[in-house]
Image (tube, rainbow, N blue to C red):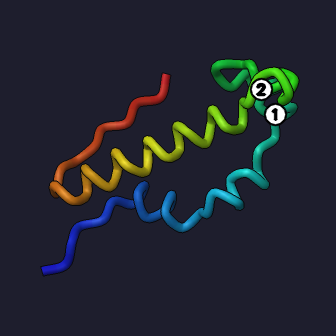
Amino acid sequence: MPTPRSSLATALAAVSDEALRGRFAPDKMMRLEIYPETWDRDPAEENTLGYLMDYVAQLRSALATVVARGHGLLITIH
């Protein structure tokens, strides 16, 4: 029996960390008021891209657990 995969897990797995880093656009994220609105800080003082990538890793891990257990996931956007 095949293992169930979520669309979100599949989509996120298809994008490498390098590709995500390449898409990092702090100026645009600030214009769009993307939380936490700290994207324009000096990278020498605060690694905002590293912060973001840490959460991508956590999201991938959480999605893998959900899929492995055959559970669902509810996502809300406020």
Residue type at the position of mark 2: Trp
Residue at the extreme left: 1
Q: In this rendering, is residue 68 above or below 27?
A: below
Q: Which residue is mark 1?
A: 26
Label 1: how many Cα within 10 Å (few below 14, some 14–19, many 20+): some
Residue at the extreme bottom: 1
Residue type at the position of mark 1: Pro
Q: Which residue is mark 2?
A: 39
The quadrant in which the N terminus is found is bottom left
Label 2: how many Cα within 10 Å (few below 14, some 14–19, many 20+): many
63 horizontally vs 12: left or right:
left
| Residue 38 sits in quarter | top right
Q: CA distance from mark 1 to mark 2?
A: 5 Å
Depth check, front residue: 42 or 24: 42
Question: Secondary structure beneath disc 1?
Answer: helix
On the image, the x and y values in percent for residue 33 come to 73, 21
On the image, the x and y values in percent for residue 34 come to 68, 25
Residue drawn where x is 78% and y is 55% of the image: 22
